[in-house]
Amino acid sequence: MDLFLQDPPCLPSAWEGDRALKDALRFYLGDHFAAAEVILDELGRWATGPETLRMVMRAENEPATLMQYDAWGHRVDEVAVSDAYTELGKFGVEHGVVALAYEPEPFGDLARVVWAAAIYLWGPSSALYSCPIAMTDAAARTLFEHGDATDTEIAQRLISRDPGFAWTSGQWMTETAGGSDVARTSTVARLQGDEWRLYGTKWFTSATTSEMALTLARPEGAPDGSRGLGLFRVHRMLDDGTPNAILVRRLKDKLGTRSMPTAELELEGALAHPVGDPLDGRGVAKISTMLNITRLHNALASAGALARGHAWASSFAESREVFGRKLAAQPAHRVTLAELAVDKAAALALSLRCAHLMGRMEHGSATAEEVALFRGLTPVTKLSTARWAVAGAAEAMEALGGVGYCEDSGMPALVRNAHVLPIWEGTTNVLSLDLLRAAQRSDSFTALLTDCERAAAVAAGTAGMEQPVAAVRASVDELKKRFEDAASDLDRLQATARSIAMGAATTYACALLCEQSTALGTEGAPTAAAARRLAERGLTGPAPFASDIPNDL
Ligand code: MFK
């Protein structure tokens, strides 16, 4: 008897097969769409091509390694990465995964939208080279905003498309005592002669092979807490070609992101260059420029993971027959695929809107309301998309059945790598609290809800959009009430923060999809369907605890 062998699923071009992305870009880009399509079409064909997918698999199977000593006992601390990882990154750099955001032509203040689409397509095939790229982009913007002429010169390397000239940057924030609570940073900056030297241990430093990093340290004599911290640029190698005084204690043995090295570093008097005045107590505020950009990268990685999971599940369902018909035609499975598509559309809507606002801020065309909106939207987008990505990656793996659970399908890597997304760059709770802080300091929450109402108003009166528009309006009222009910008691407000943040994410995603589908007219039918489905699921999510959290649960 012949053994039945299933044809492997075959991914379409990541660009060609992504209707939600194209529709969203038509909405944002208008006349610029055609120019963007040329770039994104090439990236999309590359991202899901068989050769690229083989390289991704190879990079995943060749984790980063550390050699601390050479054969003669000298301390060398050499971190090696797979050449497949390097090649995937090089392709991205050449195709502008940083540069696109900084090139004034042809997209002007819409450059971040095109850039975001590029990251979304390239990221899932980067074997986590997306991590150094996130930090590189973020470091470049931070140096441009807060640095001097030398910093600006260094930043040219970070935004270059030439792999021979381009550098990547790390972001060393986390210490043993301070992951979320960065105020507990204990690295000391000592002024020795006219040079700053850093002493301390950095506990998680990703992309250890990067040529430089931005890091926080406390100048000797500066006050405790976050207001005593300065921001410093540190290079791995010194100008004379010798290594800086940085020891690699060990590489982290992580659940995922294996091709990308993450180390513990010992700074033993590492030469460092202050970014701005190291004694102005603005280190955290300055590195926040960086955080907001890496958080958007994180959101795009989440949307990209959802897209890749959905693509695998859909193409498998097209080729698989079960119980007498195609899996893609089985009602239960159609629901699963549709729900994945809705999550992807929501993640994309939030991420692209964030990118749109960021581009306007970077080009000086954003209004004060848009700046306030961006401040609240960034944590909301990062936290929600990351959680959707974890659930979506697991769902996609399940959709491939037993083969999806096997390493050589690539799905376990998708699941492993998705799990970092809610953790790095601020956990779900830390970012929920960040939304509260932004709400209190810059009225960002009000700006977010106001923009929900604005977007819903655009769609009001459009046939078929009555239900999602009404749901957005009701949810805005409910979220305001949740905030106001808890506002007078800080502990209660913090206990409510996640419910408010997740509710705001789904509500804003629905509002954006309502607005986009209306603008797209008949072409916007799939976007309208996604908005309706979000509304059917319920926008506000679970209510917070009605009273104190019971101790006996
Ligand atoms: C593929 C994806 C790629 C992603 C790769 C990334 C890999 C990188 C790996 C990592 O480095 S992960 C580690 C990331 N660590 C974090 O995300 C830290 C999480 N903790 C926080 O975000 C805390 O909220 C924070 C450290 C910012 C709290 O610090 P503080 O000093 O206690 O907070 P405070 O007093 O609110 O903020 C100090 C200043 O910064 C204030 O300015 P002002 O003095 O002018 O008022 C704040 O307004 C400002 N600030 C804080 N967060 C901001 C911000 N400004 C703008 N945007 C923000 N998000």
Image (cartoon, rainbow, N blue to C red):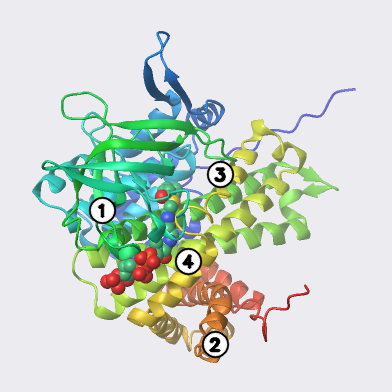
- Front in this rendered view, residue 370 or 286: 286
Tell me if I can see residue 28 in this picture.
Answer: no
For residue 155, what is the image quadrant?
Answer: top left
How far apart are the alpha carbons under marks 3 and 1? Answer: 29 Å
Question: Which badge, 3 or 4, comes first in the chain's sequence?
Answer: 3
Question: Which badge, 1 or 4, comes first in the chain's sequence?
Answer: 1
Q: Give the amino acid at mark 4.
A: Leu
Mark 4 vs ligand 1: CB below 8 Å: yes
Query: x, y percentage for residue 385?
Result: 52, 61
Q: Give the amino acid at mark 1.
A: Leu
Q: Which mark is residue 417?
A: 3
How far apart are the alpha carbons under marks 2 and 1? Answer: 35 Å
From the viewer's perspective, is residue 100 above or below residue 45?
Answer: below
Q: Give the amino acid at mark 2.
A: Ala
How far apart are the alpha carbons under marks 1 and 4? Answer: 22 Å
Question: Which badge, 2 or 1, comes first in the chain's sequence?
Answer: 1
Density class for disc 2 (Cα within 10 Å; few <14, some 14-19, many ≥20) is: some
The residue pinned by badge 4 equals: 431
The residue pinned by badge 2 equals: 486
Query: x, y percentage for residue 288?
Result: 32, 61
How far apart are the alpha carbons under marks 2 and 3? Answer: 36 Å
The residue pinned by badge 1 equals: 231
Residue at 39 percent of width and 24 percent of height: 77
